[in-house]
């Protein structure tokens, strides 16, 4: 056992067991699928593999995984037994969280780290949870697991750019001093243990971000920084830029955008190579994530490109101490010249509504290439008319319309998926959106 204040020249005599949480679910499929189908099973293993590589590269003597594949089935007692059998110095279980069924999943996203609470009766690792009495409000591995948890919770929240719910004691967190339960994966560990909830897989935008491998690597790096700080090891300069490429006005993440800097290039995920694989049927879904590690110190130019958008170059000053976050919005590009001169032609287009999901209102932007009759309807999943937002003649140009989630009678519609359909002459465009109450 080692206190946080211990300073070591290296980590060669440290051993760590990483537990990538849930394997296969009871029905034989990956456990805890998220809002867009990407599961906790897949995310946790990916984070664990990245973290294992980082810890080993930093000189940790041994890093053990409780499972090495997404199809492995490992029980709670088996996971802790692996850590105990190898007599490791630390046991850490990697998870993501889920919103309660009675709450809107799109509104809840935070990180926290759970640890075992000391109980008023038996301290034996062989006593059943029900025999240990009420909680005491202090950590079982006081001065160790709570110190590590505080570091992890802070860095995870900052890496995900979400709320930090901090270090939480399991017995009290799950029902109060006299009515909770102890997390089974921590209950019989013979060494300090922690369990991280990196973010919510039920949160739609978060689940899309988690599909990006480098984004999962960023979570692993947050945990890696925590381990090094706990053991008093000076970490190398971070010099990592993480951000999201979005469309101007709507703010939606852009697929297939290219980012270039320092002779390196990164392409954001596309629908066909990423999101379709997770049974995402909405071809407009994306995360826009870009990620660069080991960048030069100081200020560097970053150039952003995407089909149909203006090339944009900005300068980013890269920090040494933590991730450097930089989001960017790209404006649509238009034809600058046409045969015979004159004004550039407009393109008939219907943008993704923003925000999406939304409550209480959302904006819809569309462009008409020429004057004429235009109609914009809101439809339900059955294709039935919910509301008509525009039904008139308009000049060529770009327009923005707001929908407040009501039907033709002025009543607020139920939560769910809706379509908005734009008709102009013989042309029709349709997109999907989500209304939450």
Image (spheres, rainbow, N blue to C red):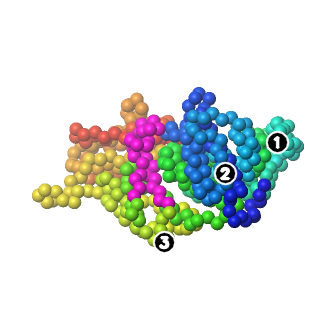
Residue occupying the far right of the picture: 121
Marks 3 and 2 in Cβ contact (< 8 Å): no
Question: Residue 252, which numbered label?
Answer: none
Residue 424 location (% of width, % of height): 25, 42
| Magenta residues (range) | 265-293
Mark 1 surroundings within 10 Å by alpha-carbon count, few (fewer than 14), some (14 through 19), many (20 or more): few
Marker count (numbered):
3
Identify which residue is drawn at 40% across, 60% down: 264
Pick the residue in front: 68 or 418. 68
Please name the residue that numbered disc 3 is placed on.
298
For residue 96, what is the image quadrant?
top right
Camera-near label (3 vs 2) is 2
Q: Earlier in the sequence, mark 1 or mark 3?
A: 1
Residue 38 location (% of width, % of height): 52, 40
Identify which residue is drawn at 47% across, 68% down: 296
Q: Is residue 108 visible?
A: no
Q: Which element type, helix, strand or loop, lies under badge 3?
A: strand
Marks 1 and 3 in Cβ contact (< 8 Å): no
Identify which residue is drawn at 45% across, 55% down: 290
Mark 2 surroundings within 10 Å by alpha-carbon count, few (fewer than 14), some (14 through 19), many (20 or more): some
**Label 2 vs label 1: CA separation?**
24 Å
Q: Which element type, helix, strand or loop, lies under badge 2?
A: strand
Q: Which element type, helix, strand or loop, lies under badge 1?
A: loop
Q: Earlier in the sequence, mark 2 or mark 1?
A: 2
Q: Is residue 42 left or right of residue 274?
A: right
Identify which residue is drawn at 71% across, 48% down: 91
Please name the residue that numbered disc 2 is placed on.
62
Residue occupying the far bottom of the picture: 298
Please name the residue that numbered disc 1 is placed on.
125
Q: Is residue 87 left or right of residue 27?
A: right
Residue occupying the far top of the picture: 27
Camera-near label (2 vs 1) is 2
């Amino acid at each position: 056992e080692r206190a946080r204040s211990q300073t070591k020249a290296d980590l060669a005599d440290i051993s760590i067991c990483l537990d990538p949480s849930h394997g296969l679910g009871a029905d034989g499929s990956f456990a805890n699928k998220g809002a867009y189908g990407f599961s906790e099973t897949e995310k946790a293993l990916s984070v664990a593999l990245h973290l294992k590589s980082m810890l080993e590269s930093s000189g940790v003597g041994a890093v053990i995984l409780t499972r090495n594949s997404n199809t492995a089935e490992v029980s709670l007692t088996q996971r802790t037994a692996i850590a105990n059998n190898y007599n490791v110095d630390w046991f850490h279980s990697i998870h993501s969280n889920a919103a309660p069924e009675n709450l809107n999943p799109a509104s809840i996203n935070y990180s926290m780290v759970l640890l075992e609470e000391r109980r008023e009766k038996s301290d034996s690792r062989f006593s059943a949870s029900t025999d240990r009495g009420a909680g005491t409000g202090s950590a079982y591995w006081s001065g160790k697991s709570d110190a590590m948890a505080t570091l992890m919770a802070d860095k995870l929240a900052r890496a995900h750019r979400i709320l930090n719910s901090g270090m939480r004691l399991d017995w009290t967190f799950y029902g109060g001093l006299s009515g909770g339960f102890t997390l089974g994966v921590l209950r019989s560990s013979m060494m300090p243990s922690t369990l991280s909830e990196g973010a919510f897989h039920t949160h739609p935008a978060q689940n899309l971000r988690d599909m990006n491998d480098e984004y999962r690597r960023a979570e692993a790096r947050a945990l890696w920084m925590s381990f090094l700080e706990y053991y008093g090891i000076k970490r190398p300069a971070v010099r990592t830029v993480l951000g999201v490429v979005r469309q101007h006005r709507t703010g939606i993440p852009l697929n297939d955008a290219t980012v270039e800097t320092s002779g390196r290039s990164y392409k954001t995920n596309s629908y066909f190579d990423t999101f379709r694989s997770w049974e995402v049927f909405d071809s407009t879904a994306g995360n826009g994530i870009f990620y660069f590690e080991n960048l030069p110190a100081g200020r560097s130019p970053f150039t952003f490109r995407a089909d149909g958008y203006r090339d944009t170059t900005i300068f980013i000053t890269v920090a040494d101490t933590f991730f450097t976050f930089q989001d960017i919005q790209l404006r649509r590009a238009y034809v600058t010249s046409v045969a015979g001169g004159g004004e550039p032609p407009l393109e008939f287009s219907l943008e993704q509504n923003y925000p999406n999901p939304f409550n209480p209102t959302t904006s819809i932007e569309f462009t008409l290439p020429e004057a004429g009759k235009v109609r914009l309807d809101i439809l339900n999943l059955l294709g039935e008319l919910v509301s008509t937002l525009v039904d008139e003649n308009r000049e060529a140009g770009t327009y923005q319309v707001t929908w407040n989630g009501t039907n033709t009678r002025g009543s607020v519609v139920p939560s769910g998926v809706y379509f908005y359909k734009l008709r102009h002459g013989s042309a029709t465009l349709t997109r999907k959106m989500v209304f939450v109450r």
